[in-house]
Image (tube, rainbow, N blue to C red):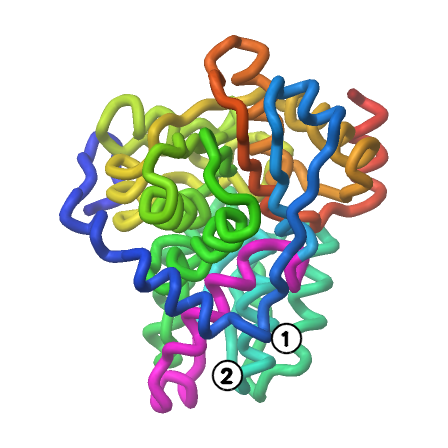
């Protein structure tokens, strides 16, 4: 599937990731990734009108769920690919995840990042990469003038590197799905599961896990109103794009769903919705005040979605899962966001 407007998903790719792949990823991640806690809050229950179970991936290594997919993908590389090294492109959380996984596994890594990436994520990526083999580096680019996939593809071809994209990769998707698998193992059946959506890797992996272990659970993807490409793609049945959307949720600024994620989302996800910038910040504040959790804007999308669905009367659920996807936010930026709200 070309990444162009109006192209339908290749639904044959929806079977590229199975519950067996997710369970195999869980075995690889055992003892390496954190089994993050599930938290509850009466205040959040009241806002949603249901019992809410919060999967805290903001407390995962590198501060985001991305470590799951990155480590799973890198650990499956053959010896020759490990020797040559990997390349990825990311605004921050996947960059950090690949950098740490590469350091742990002894694999050279080149990380392509936008020059406007959050400072906290850029600094952390460089720090993790310091432990990786020689040849590892961060390459910055101007997102207004450069398509990261084209830049990354050219560098990978020139240097013989294996590309490990942020979301559109079966091993990455399988790794992300382990977050939902753990949630169901801990709390049992759910009526609904809300998951943030950028490129769709976490949403796809969670949908694979949910539909296998709790088929009646409705899986809902949540995007910012200002970056609603996946919601429009889901609604229209063809690919929609959003180039450099001006949302505070930097992890959701991906321009489109991928070949695998579009197919899985269209096949297994029950619904997509959007939330406003104000709703995102409000969810961040609630999570900080009531659960004492530092959550980045993208990480609060699912919480904001559950609250909005309840307010609009569309939730109709008594047991709700929410995946907090990350907590990497600059403290100065966080203060400004909360003051503005």
Main secondary structure of the magenta stretch: helix
Q: Is residue 316 left or right of residue 33?
A: left
Q: Is residue 9 left or right of residue 137?
A: left
Picture coordinates of residue 77, whole percent (x, y): 37, 80
> Which residue is found at the position 83% from the left and 32% from the top?
289
Residue 329 - label = none
What residue did someone put label 1 on? 129
Q: Is residue 62 magenta?
A: yes
Compared to residue 63, the image places residue 76 above or below, namely below
> Which residue is found at the position 58% from the left and 60% from the top?
140
> Which residue is found at the position 46% from the left and 66% from the top?
26
- Label 2 Cα crowd, 10 Å radius (few <14 / some 14-19 / many 20+): many
> Which residue is found at the position 61% from the left and 28% from the top?
51
Picture coordinates of residue 192, whole percent (x, y): 46, 30
Which of these two is toward me, 49 or 74?
Answer: 49
Q: Is residue 320 left or right of residue 9?
A: right
Compared to residue 116, the image places residue 71 above or below, namely below
In what element is the residue under mark 1? helix
Picture coordinates of residue 174, whole percent (x, y): 38, 59
Q: Residue furthest front?
A: 188
User: In which quadrant will I find the C terminus?
Assistant: top right
Mark 1 in CB contact with mark 2 (< 8 angstroms): no
- Label 1 Cα crowd, 10 Å radius (few <14 / some 14-19 / many 20+): many
Compared to residue 68, the image places residue 283 above or below, namely above
Q: Let me know if residue 141 appears in the view.
A: no
Which of these two is toward me, 301 or 6?
Answer: 301
User: What are the residue bounds of the magenta stretch?
Assistant: 60-86
Counting residues from the start of the chain, the first of labels 1 and 2 encountered is 2
What residue did someone put label 2 on? 107
Mark-to-mark CA distance, 1 and 2: 10 Å
């Amino acid at each position: 599937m070309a990444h162009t407007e109006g192209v339908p998903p290749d639904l044959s790719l929806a079977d590229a990731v199975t519950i067996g792949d997710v369970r195999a990823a869980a075995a690889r991640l055992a003892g390496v990734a954190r089994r993050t806690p599930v938290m509850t809050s009466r205040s959040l229950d009241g806002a949603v009108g249901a019992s809410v179970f919060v999967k805290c991936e903001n407390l995962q290594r590198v501060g985001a769920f991305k470590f799951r997919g990155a480590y799973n993908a890198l650990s499956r590389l053959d010896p020759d690919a490990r020797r040559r090294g990997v390349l990825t492109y990311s605004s921050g959380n996947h960059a950090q995840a690949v950098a740490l996984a590469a350091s742990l596994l002894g694999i050279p890594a080149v990380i392509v990042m936008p020059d406007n990436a959050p400072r906290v994520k850029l600094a952390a990526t460089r720090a993790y990469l310091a432990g990786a083999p020689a040849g590892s580096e961060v390459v910055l680019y101007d997102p207004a003038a450069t398509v990261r996939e084209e830049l990354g593809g050219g560098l990978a071809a020139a240097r013989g590197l294996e590309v490990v994209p942020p979301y559109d990769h079966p091993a990455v998707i399988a790794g992300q799905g382990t977050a939902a698998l753990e949630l169901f193992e801990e709390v049992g059946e759910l009526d609904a599961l809300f998951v943030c959506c950028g490129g769709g890797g976490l949403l796809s992996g969670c949908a694979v896990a949910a539909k296998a272990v709790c088929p009646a659970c409705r899986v809902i993807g949540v995007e910012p109103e200002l970056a609603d490409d996946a919601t429009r793609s889901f609604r229209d049945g063809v690919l929609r794009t959003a180039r450099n959307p001006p949302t505070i949720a930097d992890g959701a600024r991906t321009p489109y769903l991928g070949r695998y994620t579009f197919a899985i989302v269209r096949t297994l996800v029950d619904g997509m919705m959007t939330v406003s910038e104000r709703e995102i910040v409000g969810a961040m504040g609630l999570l900080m005040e009531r659960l004492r959790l530092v959550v980045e804007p993208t990480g609060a999308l699912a919480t904001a979605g559950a609250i909005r669905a309840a307010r609009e009367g569309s939730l109709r659920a008594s047991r709700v899962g929410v995946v907090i996807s990350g907590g990497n936010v600059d403290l100065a930026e966080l203060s400004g966001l909360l003051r503005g709200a």
